[in-house]
Image (spheres, coloured by chain):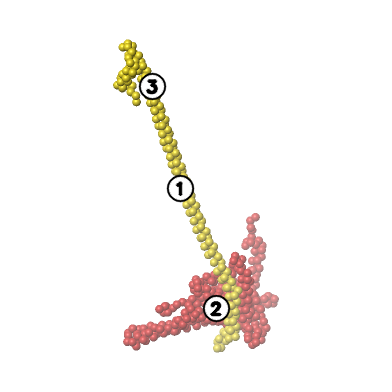
Amino acid sequence: MAKRGCLGCSFPLVIGLLVVFLVLIVGGFVIGPLGQSMLGGLELPGWLTALSVDRPDPRLPAEAVFHIFGFPITNSIIGAWITIIFLVGVSYIITRRMKLVPGRLQAAFEFLIGWLYDLCVSAAGEKNGRRFFPLVTTIFLFVGFNAWLALLPGFGSITAHTAEGEVALIRAANTDINMPLALALTSFIFVEFYGLRTLGIHYLGKFLNFKEFFRAARQIFTGKLKAGASGLVTGAMTVFSGLLEGLSEFIRIVSLTFRLFGNMTAGEILLLVAAFLIPWLFAIPFYGLELLIGFIQAIIFGGLTLIFLTLAVEHHEEEAH
Amino acid sequence: MGGLESLGINMPTLLAQLINVAILFGLLYLVAYKPIMRMLDERSRRVKESMEQTEQIKQQAERAEEEAAKRITDASREGEEVVARAMRTGEEVRKEAQAQARQEAETLITRARAEIQQERNEAVGELRKEFADLTVMAAEKVIDRSLDKKAHRDIIDKVLKEAPTLKKE
């Protein structure tokens, strides 16, 4: 029997779905502020306007939901907890009974972890890749799944009554700047730690590079004035570039923090605004976009951390001799 | 500080999130990275092992094949040797038999010749005697007188000695 219909459904069903889809789109357009301003104050029954979405009121600081011993627990902390519980729970369920011949779930999880591991090894080499892999993977998983879980219903829509008024109970952790900052600080701490541990005191020589300067000064004192003078200039330049490099270590914290924070916050605001302007179905494509952006940010944050780690443990040219 | 406050940076939350990251790191290390790395290592070890085993088995098979080929060559060479030896032996046996046969024939011929010689001698002796008698008789008749028998015999013997054809051998 030849399959009739479209997309696996019979024609009446497809047509019905299309009609529902169109009605939802048009209805959203009509009751939303965008349609209202374009069509010019259409009189709508009250039950329909009640379905419109409130104007979004994004606030950058996360709101405290409750306090434990005077310690504010913000909704973004709760969001971080949920991500942590999700990641650890899933990992635990999957790795509780590991099999040499994996089932589907284990194979998928192993594929993800193995992919990140291969990434680390290909960037930092076999030995260092193995050392960096847990940190890079943790950052990747947290950033990615935090962004994806925030797309689920419940994030931002469940509210709690607090002293500050009605606030969202759960908020994606990376839309509160403390979380990106914490991640960037973690990345920074690990970078400096591995740099110091691998290269020892030489690691600091990358930033405080007086070697050439002093050698030139010695040359001047011993009488080689011409060589000493030119050496003094290049020495001063290496000192300056070393200081710049040291400064860039700290600038990394800022750039990592604000890249993640900006992208996540902008994504959330984009969804809120899309849902506000044309309620109901219009925001769906943006959810797809946010899925992609969450993944990209995870890759960027994890990848940059990996690159910084690799650069930190590399032997510098000047240290070679 | 007011700018940072309005961005939302505050110490307690930052501290809490740092602790959260540390907790996540530790827990994931325990429940995800360690078991999974162990499993991946184990698997790659197994794969390596099985590949080494395959290599070994392949080498073994090659060795066995070589051995079999060598054995076949050896066996065929041995077979050829056996056949050659058998042929040589056959030839020897044949030659021996021939030689023996020839020898026997020669012996037979020799003996026969000796017998013939003997018989001839006997015949000659007899003939001589008869001839002597005949001659004596004839001479008696001719000269008509009987000679002394002994004298006769001497004469005949003398004649016979001079006759070359009836010489005793």
Circle 3 is placed at which residue position? B123
Amino acid tagged 1: Arg
Q: Secondary structure at mark 2?
A: helix
Circle 2 is placed at which residue position? A260
Residue nearest the viewer, comparing A295 with B29? B29
Q: Secondary structure at mark 3?
A: helix
**Same subunit: marks 1 and 2:** no
Of badges 3 and 2, nearer the viewer stands 3
Q: Which chain is red?
A: A
Circle 1 is placed at which residue position? B77
Residue A65 sits in quarter: bottom right
Label 1 neighbourhood size at 10 Å, few (<14), some (14-19), many (20+)?
A: few
**Which residue is located at x 36 percent, y 85 percent?**
A216
**Which residue is located at x 56 percent, y 73 percent?**
A295
Amino acid tagged 2: Leu
Of badges 1 and 2, nearer the viewer stands 1
Q: Which chain is yellow?
A: B
Who comes first in sequence, dot 1 or dot 3? 1
Picture coordinates of residue A290, whole percent (x, y): 58, 74
